[in-house]
Image (cartoon, coloured by chain):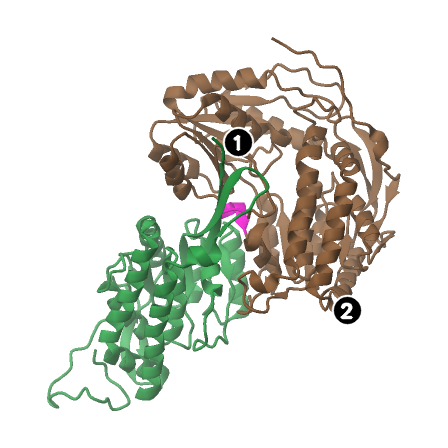
Amino acid sequence: MSVPSDQPKEGTSGPVDRLEVRKTYKLFIGGAFPRSESGRTYEVTSAAGVFLANAAKASRKDGRDAVLAARKAFGGWSAATAYNRGQVLYRVAEVMEGRRAQFVADVRDAEGLDDAAAGRQVDAAVDRWVWYAGWADKLAQALGSANPVAGPYFNFSIPEPTGVVAAVAPQDSSLLGLVSVIAPTIVSGNAVIVVASTLRPLPAISLAEALATSDVPAGVVNILTGDPVEIMPWLASHADVNAVDLTGIVDREVATALERDAAGTLSRVRRPEPDSDWSTDPGLSRIRSVVETKTVWHPMGV
Amino acid sequence: MTFEYAPAPESRSLVDIASSYGLFIDGEFTEPVDGGSFKTTNPATEEVLSEVSEAGADDVDRAVRAARSAYERVWGPMSGRDRAKYLFRIARLIQERSRELAVLETLDNGKPIRESRDVDLPLVAAHFFYHAGWADKLEHAGYGPDPRPIGVAAQVIPWNFPLLMLAWKIAPALACGNTVVLKPAETTPLSALAFADICRQADLPPGVVNILTGAGETGRLLVEHPGVDKVAFTGSTDVGKSIMRSAAGTSKRLTLELGGKAANVIFDDAPIDQAVEGVVNGIFFNQGHVCCAGSRLLVQESVAEEVVASLKRRLGTLRLGDPLDKNTDIGAINSAAQLARIDALVKSGEDEGADRWSAPCAIPERGWWFPPTVFTGVTQAHRIAREEIFGPVLSVLTFRTPDEAVEKANNTPYGLSAGIWTEKGSRILWMAERLRAGVVWANTFNRFDPASPFGGYKESGFGREGGVQGLGAYLTTEEGR
């Protein structure tokens, strides 16, 4: 990728007189890249204020379309074998690694980092996919159980994905934070609609391009750019959304209102975490917050 | 052939009910500061059993403070080994007094003594016994190396299994190092008050368990109290939603165990007699006052006629009447209000065109009763197929293919439980994988155990009770959640 930057780029120097081809940044819904149905865009600048792109400003209708796409994808994705889901997540890491330079440039521009610091963010994001990829076929053993009930029954519990999750990505960490929200959500078989960082959305769209060319089925990850305060009330109250992840909501009152919206259909809520340190070991907390425990009983006898 | 049974009533003399009760706060019974009182009755006779206090705002505040103080000074810092010993003591005391508690439960709730004696009380003791053992082993529960308690838990429980729901709430909370303020249901406060006496006998430090009696307003004041760190509620989906709204924007942790509309699915290869027994247990256990009751019977079309005929024949043999009689199968409906709700939904079933059949049993003159009732010709659009009735009313629907069974079973906003009846193992596992419900009973129904996590998907709530998974509701983990 090549976007205008306020900082000189390393290792990307081409013919000086060539005018670069810029990219239109769109939404990612159901595996496709539509513009917002509202036709709206907003200007995205680098951390230093230089124009980068006009990002699509998603509407509530885009949000609802994304829920439809996610619900459609949920059946197949949740029914895929854990081994398969693990490979798909690992494939995302592979594809990202191959596009490392693009992600470094994106994160550098978005977060105002130098190339080395941006590179560390990208490396951590790739490694996070790898880490979560490995969890896919271990979750049921870590979170599930065989239960010694007091009677002649075979009884076991397994974690299952809760369904369609609407998430708000962190506002500051445009790629590592985003990946740290998406990967633990989909590894167990959920489908997600994630609203990218409002001011730093471009790494999210580049991630969408990586997802589209990896093996993630269409609709499993849907990425919206725009204002979460505008879009999220429609998702939090949506009857076909099972869980809401408010990680990237900054305003306490907005978060409170969204939690109330979610109560209407008892969507599970993960509350905002404005000060998260995305470089630390994520643990199982995020995976736990979007799985359900199913317990199955059967009599034993001859 | 009909067997005549002589009455076999359990003795009431085991139970000593006081004429009035205060609130159990900080280890002693005290009079309510600003609240009034209300009467609790025996639903089988409408006899007033006792007068209990109604906790008001000041009482809630006192109880939460007592719980906080006990948490900070005694229970939080206490070693897991000692917490375990207190819980083992409580388990033993419950076993020792289980006959008395079973009679008390039946008097206040209306459930048959056979159930309170053989199901509720053994499970209550088992729940404390199971969780006692966790208290000093929490670092092995998979929540990180140093899981911590949350603090003060506000717990609000329903009237269908009064003491069992108390055990589901208090045992894990205490095992994990939390202190509790528990509000039993308005119509069934007596067994929780008896539990206060068990806390006394166990020498449980004051303030670790506080019992506030009252109605919905007391519950609201309790869960909305700012000094509460954790809210656990079992009850209706509507109230669950309002509690979730009230907790929005706070740091309170929340678990909700709400309503259900479970499907019990019978395939054509199922052993019909066993399946019918399971269906009867699924919906008529505890007069259908069970959130996970199998209130929708989905039966494969080819065996529908046979199943329904067998079901009606079996229901004709159920004995409805005096809950204290050891022969009684169906006890009293817990309250006039609940009976009115059942009546209204049954009437909607008739009005919407479903065919009603009720078992031909004599209804006692006093008390609140409803005969076992089956609706056939029910469609998914009928209210009786969509709404939780919480009474002894079964709606029968049919299906042709396994896919259709799954679709119909999942066609509800609830997701608490489900049942499968078939002889084919692969089909059981195929179905179990697809049913969106927290508990799936295959070739059985309504089984409970403290080692087995219980809780719902979707609008049946979130969080689990029981098992290693249930501990998560009362622990702060390494990740700070």
Give the percent coordinates (x, y) of residue B362.
Answer: 68, 15
Give the percent coordinates (x, y) of residue B181.
Answer: 73, 55
Measure the C-alpha gap from mark 2 to mark 1: 47 Å
Judging by the rendered image, the residue that carries numbered circle 2 is B73
Identify residue type, mark 2. Answer: Arg
Q: Which range is magenta?
A: B455-462
Task: Tell me the element at label 1.
Answer: loop
Q: Is residue A175 visible?
A: no
Q: Colour of chain B?
A: brown
Chain letter for the residue marked with disc 1 in the picture:
B
- In the image: residue B50, left or right of residue A267: right
Judging by the rendered image, the residue that carries numbered circle 1 is B295
Residue at 87% over, 51% down: B31
Report which quarter residue B367 is drawn in: top right
- Tell me which numbered mark, 2 or 1, is placed earlier along the sequence: 2
Identify residue type, mark 1. Answer: Ser
- In the image: residue B66, left or right of residue A70: right
- In the image: residue B449, left or right of residue B396: right
Number of labels in the image equals 2
Q: Which chain is assigned green?
A: A
